[in-house]
Image (cartoon, rainbow, N blue to C red):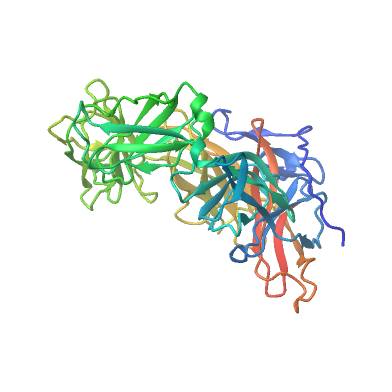
Amino acid sequence: MRRMRMALLALALGGLRCAYLPDSPKESLLVCRNDSECSEGQVCFPDGCGDPGQHIVVEVTPNPKAGQHAQDFPVDNLRAQQNLELFKPASLQGKVVRESLLSGPSTTAYSSTVTVRTSGESLLIPGLTRRYEGTLVPDNGLYQLWSGSGRYTVTLLAADPEVPPLRQEGVVVEPGHTVGLDFLLPAPTAITHLAGKVVRLGTTLVNADLEVQALSDALSPLSQRVPVTRATGDFVLALPPSAAKLDHVLVQVTVPRADVLVPQKAFTVDPRPGITPPLELGDYGDPVTVQGRVVDRDGQPVANASVYLQGKVGGGGQFRSGTAVTGADGRFELSSLPSSLDTPMTLYAVPPTSSAAGILLQPTAIPRGGAALSDVICPDKVIAQGTLLGPDGVPAAGVRVVAEPVGEVPGWPRPAMGTEADSATDEEGHYRLRLDPGEYRFDFIPAENLPRVSRFVTVQPSTNLELAPFTLSKGRRVTGLVMNSEAHDSPIPGVPYASIRFFRVVNVEGKPTSVLLAQTVSDSTGAYAATLPTR
């Protein structure tokens, strides 16, 4: 069987027959409504009409617990029988060594505990993020970290806070490949030490648990995050030798837990040898109690809403309170710092997804004596509704409708989680969701043997959406075997219980992204079956 070759997919965007859904392009993206608007053999996708057998990428995740992570395969022409032959597991491996300058330049193997962390996304599936991490003790300096395919930023963090973090960007891991990546730690005598003191005001100490870290102007870590000595306010940061050539670094003071009522603040500090002035957090006031009640537009209490405060406080720092959850009566109580005299904080009230009340961002001044707030009135969520038809034009009943947030609209935070319609489409094919403002991907997931389809919708505040009727595609069954070319002595023909996901790469408003077409799991023999769209 021919092994699928890794290749970037070219997006063919010409010749699309499309219509607006709904009428205004600011409310939703340019898409076709059904397959009948497309040329023969084409299917209506989120970016318009296209060949259902093209621009497909398959992600296979064999067994993460065994270090067998995600592998991606481009499919040039999807067939009814589509076997998937896996490569051997991919990994990062190399040597961690440390410079020594005691008797001339040399290196020694580093064999103390380190954490290797990768963060990035798939090479072939735009927007699909991946992250892997392993804490280990290098064997005579040698390490290995199993990884899925992708493009990553790789960070090595030693358990010893005297070792600055190392970071490499643009590391490409392809299926079946072992990527060599060595790390050279600076010699202890070459490290730039930055000593300082955190105070509240003048010589007054903060008397709270604090942490500090040095960052570059691009906010990349130059040091590890280390605790501040509570009794004295002192700290010492270990920076790479190159930091001694910088005219400044950023030192960020943070808290380790939400219950520490102290602001976060960043300072510009000269890392070159000398005396660092105390880092003064300023007069941010004493903790206060904030009470209130969250209600909907009809004045009814909103239970189980998350409430917190965030913003500028005295001294110029930034503060976020812990989160309080409203009771059955809508009431909440939380501890906060007073807001800055010239700038109110922002109160966030986030009702549960099941509530008809929507998220609220409200400027709120918190005085130094605390505050009993007037009722916090949440707006209604935006109603997005429409009709779903089957491939034969008959209303499609029993289809799940899920809205997954993919972005934010100006002035509003990105919704934290997806929302599913309270019930599947009814006998008339109607569906209805209540949503906070944001950019969403609507996933229509039929219960019968039809493929899932997706559309991108922008939900603006205070504007209910009546979406034009949309028609599901016909489905075709794709079967195959997940195979491992390295497992020659396996008693079963395939890879059992592997996770398989089919994606289509699309271009929405000039930005490459991906939509999930089908997902399934191979059986005990490695065989799988999935339903994908067809004309």
Q: Is there any visible trace of residue 468 in the rendered image? A: no
Residue most extreme to the front? 103
| Image x and y of residue 273, in percent | 42, 26
Residue at 22% over, 44% down: 334
**Where is residue 422, by image quadrant?**
bottom left
| Image x and y of residue 204, in percent | 18, 31
Residue most extreme to the right? 1
512 sits left or right of 12 in the view:
left
**Where is residue 357, by image quadrant?**
top left
119 sits left or right of 507 in the view:
left
495 sits left or right of 447 in the view:
right
The answer to whether 274 is drawn above or below residue 116 in the figure is above
Residue at 78% over, 62% down: 85
| Image x and y of residue 310, in percent | 31, 34
Seen from the viewer's position, the closer of residues 66 and 519 is 66
Seen from the viewer's position, the closer of residues 48 and 65 is 65
59 sits left or right of 239 in the view:
right
**Where is residue 84, by image quadrant?**
bottom right
| Image x and y of residue 22, in percent | 57, 34
The answer to whether 485 is drawn above or below residue 17 in the figure is below
Image quarter in which the N terminus is found: bottom right
